Amino acid sequence: MFPPFCGYPADYPFTYFYAGLWPPLGVEYRRAYRSAHGDVAAEVAAQKKDYLARQVKALRDEIQLLRKQQATRQYAANPPSEALQTSTARKAGAVQQFPLTVFVYRDGREMEVRDYAIFGNTLWAFHRQTSRKFPLADFNLAASRQVNKEHDVEFPATISQKH
């Protein structure tokens, strides 16, 4: 009578792991090879590395969650309208405000401009994200100089009336 079958006998030649018989991929292959050939220290080091990687991922997730909670609390404490007003007030304090310069048209109308540039015979007027272009010939530069002098605003002296 034979004993019940419990696996291969210890002296059976195929009890060790052979890569040619079962080729798993990458990390699994190295782990299986280490286990089969008794490299326990390397296997323990790999397990520690995996454990630490999982801990780092968990901490990153926790930090992300805490940042979201903090943003939610700040949003609840400072509604968007107030936040927008405070941010624009900070920006307004940081940006230098230039005085309004008055340009007088030939027909007597006036145009007030805070940000402008003169290139050649063209006046570029800037406002926030837009810009407009005007020929200098449309303006009475002598009257413009006089109005700005009365308001103590420096008017460019280098531009001259050209037709």
Image (cartoon, rainbow, N blue to C red):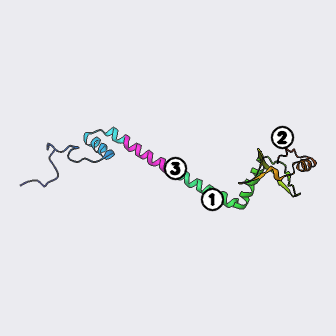
Give the mark nearest the N terminus, 2 or 1: 1
Q: Residues within 10 Å of mark 1 (few under 14, many from 20)?
A: few
Main secondary structure along the magenta-highlighted residues: helix
Query: Where does the image place residue 92, in percent across and percent down from the top left?
Result: 77, 51
**Residue stretch rendered in magenta on the structure:** 45-59
- Disc 2 residue type (three-letter): Thr
**Residue 72: numbered disc:** 1
Residue indicated by mark 3: 60
Q: Residue furthest left?
A: 1
Q: Residues within 10 Å of mark 3 (few under 14, many from 20)?
A: few
- Quote the CA–CA distance across marks 2 and 3: 61 Å
Q: Residue at x 84, y 49 (%)?
A: 99
Determine whether 39 is above or below 95 in the image. Answer: above
Q: Residue at x 87, y 58 (%)?
A: 107
Q: Secondary structure at mark 1?
A: helix
Residue indicated by mark 2: 158
- Disc 3 residue type (three-letter): Arg
Q: Residues within 10 Å of mark 2 (few under 14, many from 20)?
A: few
- Disc 1 residue type (three-letter): Thr
Nearer to us of marks 2 and 3 is 2
Give the mark nearest the N terminus, 2 or 3: 3
